[in-house]
Amino acid sequence: MSILIDKNTRLIVQGITGRDGSFHASKMKAYGTKVVGGTSPGKAGENVDGIPVFNTVKDAVKETGANTSVIFVPAPFAKDAMMEAADAGIKLIVCITEGVPTLDVVTALRFIKEKGACLIGPNCPGLISPDKSLVGIMPTMIFRQGGTGVISRSGTLTYEVVYNLTANGMGQSSAVGVGGDPVVGLYYQELLQMFENDPETDSIALIGEIGGDAEERAAAYIKEHITKPVAVFIAGQSAPPGKQMGHAGAIISSGAGTAAEKIAAFEDAGVPVAKEPSEIPALLKRKR
Amino acid sequence: MKIHEYQAKEIFASYGLPVDKSYVCKNVDEAVKAYREIGSPRAIVKAQVLTGGRGKAGGVKLAKNEEELRKYAAAILGMTIKGLKVDRILVGQAVNIASEYYVSYIVDRVSKSTILMLSKAGGMDIEEVARTTPEKIHKIIIDPLVGVPDYLAREAAFKLFDHMDHVKQAVPIFQQLYKLFVENDASLAEINPLVLTDEDNIMAIDAKMTFDDNALYRHPQIASLFEPTEDEKKEQNAKSKGFSYVNIGGNIGCMVNGAGLAMATMDIIQLYGGKPANFLDIGGSSNPTKVIEAMKLLLSDKNVKVVLINIFGGITRCDDVARGILEAFKIITTDIPIVIRLTGTNEKEGRALLEGTDFFVAETMGEATRKAVELAR
């Protein structure tokens, strides 16, 4: 088992003829993901690395039975792409695009929920269930199939943690990058619940960062609902207030959203917090 | 992105929101002219700076006659508030306040929606109100597909006002404020305070707006209002090169791929007793010109004594990154020691390429950071 994606995932790539879309479509296909199609308005009938291209998501779903979509279109068009996927009956929409206006995400997310679908991202590296399926841009060679579920707001920091897990003989059930923007789709709570319910997952690594209070709420949720061992790393302990640290969501405003508050919340909930990413495997093993 | 109160009031007024009559002034003469224009004895003088807490810093004064106005205008112009020099003031009519309220629209991360926040505790620091008396704040989640229909605006207005006449005035204010929030891709549109005057008029006597940087591309007029500080200029210059840069003030320059890893690198420098000079995310690429530009940026900070390059090779392979770095340092000459940590795809090949050079090469983040901290001492 794993969460959200596996061997049954049938993926379409929105924006497949673009530079990033075509590059990652091939990468995902090479990894073994069932990439059944792509979309690019006006380019139906073409193919990218043997993957058929359709004009609309509806056409692609009708022809291929796709259930998942990954979006690589430029930011001004991301809202439309997310809504198109939801309207076509796609159940899991993963938006990689960075720089999408927040109110576009707010509106798209409302529509996606209305259609009974789920969103991951935007501004995220996607997700992977090692040896089963990759939907996104993660570097596959660092992942191994195993029992640790990974949830993260950051891309490269996820890789850093996964690298340390794999080097310590701890594979991953699934790893999900939720995205670095203030408003994104699935978040800690939903994913913690999925990992808790997934029989293959035996521990969970959560990688948070400054900004907002999602980590504080996750800590409370873990205390109440999660029985599997969890270890945490929080980035941004040295970040100054009021400055956006790369990710649009990573900003300490009016003294709220600091790393210290988040770390305290996890410690209060009995969840060990790593001082550096390389400590995570030991913290998870200790609790097994 | 932030704008000044007077600019926010101009936007408010263009959406038909009632605001107090006021004039932006750059010197005392202009302030006196504005005072005479307003034509009432009492006038309010407010510093226009892109930060909160102006009142506490002495940047807001009530003048009761022309002489006082001259005195206050002269004092506030040239003041420095939280490191920002005041070069403009707003001179406005002093209204007769019967009661004060708080109203704002803001993007809420929890409900993943825009929310309307209301409080009868207006004119105070709203974050303080939220901390000490959260029951005094009402939050209404706005459905983006519906907006603010009359009934919802009425519900909101009844939370603040008892008289139907006041409710009727407040309804279009709440609706127009939402309209301008959405149409301009704001992340905050705040009136604190919204006042009820002795004459039974409701009006905004302060206005605050911040905008979503990701949406500025479709609002060129708002983007043109951007007034970067010296630090922000450097950040903007970095952004134009595809970097994300923030100066922190320490002496260990950092060059990292990825925002999360860049933050973690700074944290670990601090953990080992060092001081990071900056946050710098160069994105994922092995392009030598990117490394050259990043090095120029780091070396322009004269506090930097050591540079720590922390690269996690994902899709970009470590051997390509190493080649990029070698290429870049054929062009850049510096005495500053460089510590490089390369991990990930093809890491052994990458590190092998850097052997026999002047670089300090490390395998783990801990090892690289300890070295950088040691070299910075």
Image (spheres, coloured by chain):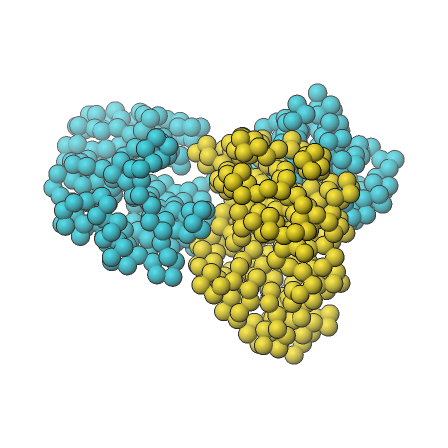
Left or right of residue B100: residue B330: right
Quick check: can you spot residue A166? Answer: yes
- Report the residue at 19% width, 25% height from top: B67
Query: In the current view of this chain or complex, which residue is farthest to the left?
Result: B199
Left or right of residue B149: residue B95: left
Q: State the quadrant of the N terminus of chain A.
A: bottom right
B238, above or below B153, in the image = above
- Report the residue at 22% width, 43% height from top: B160
Question: Dividing the picture into quarters, in which one does residue B188 lie?
Answer: top left
Query: In the current view of this chain or complex, which residue is farthest to the top?
Result: B377
B129, above or below A123, in the image = above
A69, above or below B356, in the image = below
What is the x, y in percent for residue A202?
Answer: 67, 45
Left or right of residue A17: residue B218: left
Q: State the quadrant of the C terminus of chain A.
A: top right
Figure colour of chain A: yellow
- Report the residue at 42% width, 47% height from top: B108
What is the x, y in percent for residue A161?
Answer: 69, 41
What is the x, y in percent for residue A30?
Answer: 76, 63
A229 or A163: nearer the viewer: A229
- Report the residue at 41% width, 30% height from top: B85
Question: Dividing the picture into quarters, in which one does residue B55 lie?
Answer: top left
B239 or A43: nearer the viewer: A43
B136 or B192: nearer the viewer: B136
Total marks in image: 0
Q: Give the chain letter for cyan.
A: B
Quick check: can you spot residue A77? Answer: no
What is the x, y in percent for residue B198?
Answer: 12, 38
